[in-house]
Image (spheres, rainbow, N blue to C red):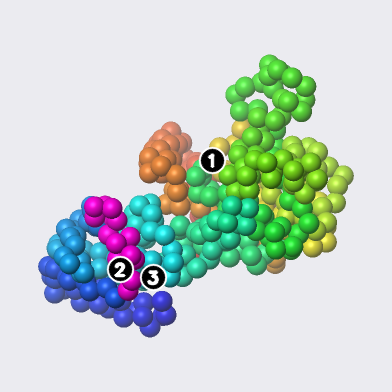
C-alpha cells in the first residue's frame, strides 16, 4: 500500500467516524476459492473479525455485509479487503492471521498487510514459507537480511530465535554460508547441574534442547542429524566457543540474557570473514547470580550506535504464542512495577534510553 493510499484510507476512516456510518456491503472481485477461504469454514473467519472489532459480519451471496457502530465497520472492511488481497496473492488465511490482522489494523488503520507478509522467508527443508506476523517481526527480518550483527531483545514467544533460525537455514540453502552455529549459555535456573545424571555433555544437553526442537521443526529430524554429523550444523554450549574463529558461518546465541559481560564479548568477537551473528534474549528473565551484570543488557547499551549492528526490541504485543502468554507477560510486568516502584523493571529502563522502540527499530 502506497503512502497516498494509506493517507486516503486514514481520511476515509476519520470521515466515517464523523458520519456515524452503520453498515457496509463489500463486493470482492477474485477467484471464488479465495472468497471461500476469506469467509472460513461455516463463516468462522467472518465471526472472528466481528468479535475482534465489535461488528456483525455476514455473508450474502458473493458479498459480505458489515453492520456496526461508527468507524468499526470501516475497520472491519479494511481488514477484510486486505485479507482478500492476501488470499489473491496466494497466502493462506489462518485463524491466527485473521485475528492478528484485526489487532494490527485496530492500532493503525494504515498498516499494509501485504507488505508485512511480503517479507517471507522460504525454508527449503520442508518447502515452508515463514512470514512476519507483527510489524516488529518485519523489522527484525529486514535487520537479519541487512546487518551482520543483530540483537533481538524481548519476551518469550515473540519469534526472536525461531525467525533467526529460519533465516539461518534459508541462507545456508542459498549457499550464502557454509554452516550454522547455535549456542546457549549453560546457566542454572533454580536446578543444579550437578544433580542431573550423565557426563558433562549429557548435563548441558537439556539447555540446548530448544535449539534442536526448532531445527527439527524447520528441517526434519533425519536431515538435522545428518547435517550435524557432517558439521554443517553445530549446537554447543557457549563455553565451547572460546578461542575459535567462525568464518563463513551464521551464528546464533540464544538466551543471551544469561551471559556475562566477558562471555558476550567473547561470542561477538568470534566472527570471522563472511559471517553473521544474531543474539537473542529476554532481559526480564535473567538467571545470573544477583548483582552480576547481564552481557546482553550491557551489549545493547554500548553497541546500539555502532554501524553494522542493529538492535530490535520486542514487546508483549509481538507475542505469537497462545493469547494468554501476552496477558501473563503483562501481569508479571505489573507485579514488578508494583513491588519496585523506585526502580522500574529492566524492560522499562531500557525503553526509556536512547535506542528504545522507534529508535533502534
In the picture, measured across the screen, residue 214 lies left or right of residue 133, that is right
How would you rate the neighbour count of disc 3 (Cα within 10 Å): few for under 14, some for 14-19, many for 20 or more? some
The residue carrying mark 3 is 88
Percent across and percent down for residue 271 are 79, 55
Reading the chain from its start, which is encountered first: label 1 or label 3?
Answer: 3
Residue 152, visible in the rendered structure: no
* Distance of label 3 from label 2 (alpha carbons): 10 Å
Question: Residue 307 sits in which quadrant?
Answer: bottom right
In the picture, measured across the screen, residue 119 lies left or right of residue 250, that is left
Give the camera-side residue of 360 and 23.
Answer: 23
How would you rate the neighbour count of disc 2 (Cα within 10 Å): few for under 14, some for 14-19, many for 20 or more? few
* Image quarter (top left, top right, bottom left or bottom right) of the N terminus: bottom left
How would you rate the neighbour count of disc 1 (Cα within 10 Å): few for under 14, some for 14-19, many for 20 or more? some
Label 1 element class = loop
Q: Is residue 328 above or below residue 87?
A: above
* Distance of label 1 from label 3 (alpha carbons): 41 Å
In the picture, measured across the screen, residue 178 lies left or right of residue 320, that is right
Residue 275: give its label: none
Please tell me whether mark 2 or mark 1 is closer to you in this view.
2
State which region is magenta: 30-45
Reading the chain from its start, which is encountered first: label 3 or label 2?
Answer: 2
Residue 58, visible in the rendered structure: yes
* Distance of label 2 from label 1 (alpha carbons): 48 Å
Reading the chain from its start, which is encountered first: label 2 or label 1?
Answer: 2
* Image quarter (top left, top right, bottom left or bottom right) of the C terminus: bottom right
Tell me which residue sits at (45%, 57%) in the image. Answer: 133
The residue carrying mark 2 is 32
Q: Main secondary structure of the magenta part?
A: helix
Residue 284: give its label: 1
Give the camera-side residue of 31 and 166.
Answer: 31
Amino acid at each position: 500500500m502506497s503512502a497516498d493510499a494509506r493517507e486516503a484510507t486514514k481520511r476515509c476512516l476519520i470521515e466515517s467516524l464523523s458520519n456515524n456510518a452503520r453498515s457496509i456491503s463489500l463486493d470482492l472481485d477474485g477467484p471464488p476459492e479465495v472468497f471461500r477461504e476469506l469467509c472460513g469454514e461455516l463463516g468462522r473467519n467472518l465471526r472472528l473479525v466481528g468479535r475482534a472489532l465489535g461488528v456483525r459480519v455476514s455473508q450474502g451471496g458473493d458479498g459480505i455485509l458489515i453492520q456496526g457502530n461508527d468507524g468499526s465497520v470501516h475497520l472491519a472492511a479494511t481488514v477484510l479487503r486486505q485479507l482478500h488481497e492476501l488470499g489473491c496473492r496466494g497466502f493462506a488465511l489462518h485463524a491466527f492471521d485473521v485475528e492478528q490482522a484485526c489487532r494490527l489494523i485496530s492500532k493503525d488503520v494504515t498498516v499494509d498487510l501485504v507488505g508485512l507478509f511480503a517479507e517471507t522467508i522460504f525454508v527449503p527443508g520442508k518447502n515452508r514459507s515463514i512470514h512476519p506476523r507483527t510489524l516488529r517481526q518485519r523489522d527484525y527480518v529486514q535487520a537479519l537480511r541487512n546487518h551482520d550483527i543483530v540483537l533481538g531483545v524481548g519476551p518469550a514467544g515473540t519469534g526472536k530465535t525461531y525467525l533467526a533460525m529460519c533465516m539461518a537455514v534459508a541462507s545456508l540453502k542459498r549457499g550464502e554460508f557454509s554452516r550454522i552455529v547455535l549456542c546457549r549459555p549453560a546457566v542454572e535456573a533454580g536446578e543444579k547441574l550437578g544433580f542431573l545424571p550423565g557426563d558433562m555433555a549429557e548435563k548441558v544437553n537439556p539447555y540446548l534442547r530448544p535449539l534442536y526442537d526448532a531445527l527439527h521443526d524447520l528441517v526434519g529430524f533425519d536431515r538435522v542429524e545428518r547435517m550435524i554429523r557432517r558439521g554443517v550444523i553445530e549446537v554447543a554450549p557457549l563455553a565451547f566457543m572460546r578461542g575459535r574463529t567462525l568464518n563463513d558461518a551464521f551464528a546464533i546465541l540464544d538466551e543471551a540474557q544469561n551471559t556475562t559481560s566477558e562471555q558476550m564479548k567473547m561470542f561477538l568477537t568470534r566472527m570471522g570473514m563472511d559471517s553473521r551473528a544474531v543474539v537473542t534474549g529476554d532481559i526480564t528473565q535473567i538467571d545470573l547470580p544477583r548483582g552480576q551484570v547481564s552481557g546482553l543488557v550491557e551489549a545493547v547499551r554500548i553497541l546500539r550506535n555502532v554501524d553494522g549492528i542493529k538492535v530490535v526490541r520486542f514487546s508483549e504485543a509481538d507475542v505469537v504464542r497462545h493469547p494468554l502468554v501476552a496477558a501473563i507477560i503483562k501481569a508479571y510486568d505489573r507485579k514488578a512495577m508494583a513491588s519496585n516502584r523506585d526502580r522500574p523493571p529492566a524492560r522499562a529502563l531500557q525503553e526509556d534510553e536512547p535506542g528504545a522502540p522507534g529508535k533502534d527499530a
